[in-house]
């Protein structure tokens, strides 16, 4: 049985649930989603925190022109890079897109690797406070002075449970967890335990294409080299020139390394290797998250 046939069988067994396709970066989520959309008369709702931005194209894994022609996509290139987008913003629009797709008599398929967004869609989020630009600015200033490990160390002092789950280089999530404590006096881990994430608000069957670590590593390396050959560096140069060097998406894997190279922090001949290593680390963290979630791996 092929991966597509396996996924179709799951969909047929659970017709009252939408399909949510997750998985590590470079595992083949988009290709699977497009093929399923064609066979199921479906439309795809992207759950990707970089693809959601316009002009972040070469290194975000956005669907190709052919894939876009084969299946309608939602929440791809939806906002300007300067706009703040979080899980709450995305989940609200994803629910709206799903309702509209169903109203047309078609099948919604959620696809992406930003697992917090998928979790927010399926279960909602703990009612923690909204983001504070002032707090985040202080965190960025601290990181510029002392480095990302210093911010992670502060989080570990007030919320060791969350800190153990987050990599010190994951500025966005480390900052958010620390921000919640600073604004409320209550650790994010406590907010999450109280919320529970136990009652589904959107019924979904979550699947992920299975790849052996060695195969996934090869796919990552091939993709990085292909994207670099397809103008990824030039895209980042253009984004920086247009004032988007501080955009949130610029901190994502690959974009961060290219930006560092353009700033002189990484030699150009070491760039590809740096992106590959960072992407492999990111993929391992994704697999760890998935191994603790209710996901059906398909082969």
Image (cartoon, rainbow, N blue to C red):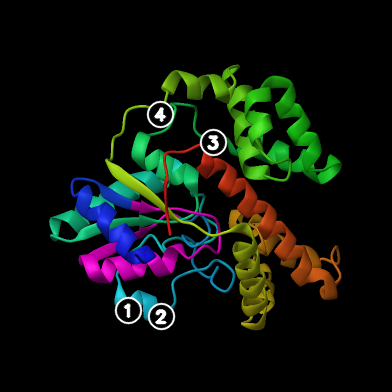
Task: Decide which of tag 3 and tag 4 comes sooner along the chain.
Answer: 3
Task: State the CA–CA distance, disc 3 to disc 2.
Answer: 35 Å
Disc 3 element = loop
Q: CA distance from mark 1 to mark 3?
A: 36 Å
State the residue at coordinates (41%, 64%).
Answer: 76
Visible residue check, residue 122? yes
Mark 1 or mark 3, earlier in chain: 1
Residue at the disc numbered 3: 131
Q: Nearer the viewer, mark 4 or mark 2?
A: 4
> What's the mark number on residue 238?
none
Per the image, the residue denoted by label 2 is 65
Is 76 included in the stretch rendered in magenta?
A: no
Please name whichever residue, 161 or 159, is drawn nearer the observer in this view of the structure: 161
Cβ atoms at labels 3 and 2 below 8 Å apart: no
Disc 4 crowd, CA 10 A, few/some/many (<14, 14-19, 20+): some
User: Secondary structure under badge 2?
Assistant: helix
Q: Which residue is mark 4?
A: 197
* In the rendered image, the vertical position of residue 245 relative to residue 22, given as above or below: below
Q: Residue at x 62, y 76 (%)?
A: 227
The residue mark sitting in front, 3 or 4, is: 4
Q: Which mark is residue 69?
A: 1
Q: Position of residue 100 (x, y in %)?
A: 20, 55
Report how far apart the C-alphas of labels 2 and 1 lie in the structure. Answer: 6 Å
Q: Tell me: residue 177, above or below residue 77.
A: above
- In the rendered view, does 180 fall on the left or right side of 8? right
Q: Quadrant of the C terminus?
A: bottom left
Q: Is residue 4 left or right of residue 282?
A: left
Which residues lie in the magenta part? 20-47
Q: Nearer the viewer, residue 292 or 96?
A: 292
Between discs 3 and 2, the one toward the N terminus: 2
Residue sitting at 43 percent across and 26 percent down? Answer: 127
């Amino acid at each position: 049985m092929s991966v597509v046939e396996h996924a179709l069988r799951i969909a047929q067994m659970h017709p009252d649930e939408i399909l949510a396709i997750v998985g590590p970066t470079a595992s083949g989520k988009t290709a699977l989603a497009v093929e399923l959309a064609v066979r199921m008369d479906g439309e795809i709702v992207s759950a990707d925190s970089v693809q959601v931005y316009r002009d972040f194209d070469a290194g975000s894994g956005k669907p190709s022109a052919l894939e876009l022609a084969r299946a309608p996509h939602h929440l791809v290139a939806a906002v300007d890079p300067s706009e703040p987008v979080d899980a709450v913003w995305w989940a609200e629009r994803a629910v709206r897109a799903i309702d509209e797709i169903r109203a047309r008599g078609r099948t919604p398929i959620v696809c992406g690797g930003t697992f917090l967004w998928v979790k927010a869609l399926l279960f909602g989020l703990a009612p923690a406070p909204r983001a504070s630009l002032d707090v985040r600015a202080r965190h960025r200033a601290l990181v510029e002075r002392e480095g990302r490990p210093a911010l992670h160390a502060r989080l570990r002092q007030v919320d060791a449970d969350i800190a153990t789950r987050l990599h010190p280089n994951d500025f966005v999530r480390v900052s958010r967890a620390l921000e919640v404590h600073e604004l409320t006096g209550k650790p994010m881990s406590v907010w999450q335990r109280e919320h529970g994430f136990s009652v589904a608000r959107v019924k979904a069957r979550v699947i992920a294409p299975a790849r052996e670590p060695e195969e996934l590593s090869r796919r990552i390396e091939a993709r990085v080299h292909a994207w670099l050959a397809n103008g990824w560096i030039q895209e980042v140069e253009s984004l920086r020139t247009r004032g988007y060097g501080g955009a949130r998406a610029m901190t994502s894997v690959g974009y961060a390394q290219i930006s560092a190279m353009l700033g002189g922090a990484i030699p150009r001949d070491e760039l590809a290797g740096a992106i590959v290593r960072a992407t492999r680390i990111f993929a391992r963290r994704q697999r760890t998250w998935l191994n603790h979630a209710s996901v059906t791996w398909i082969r």
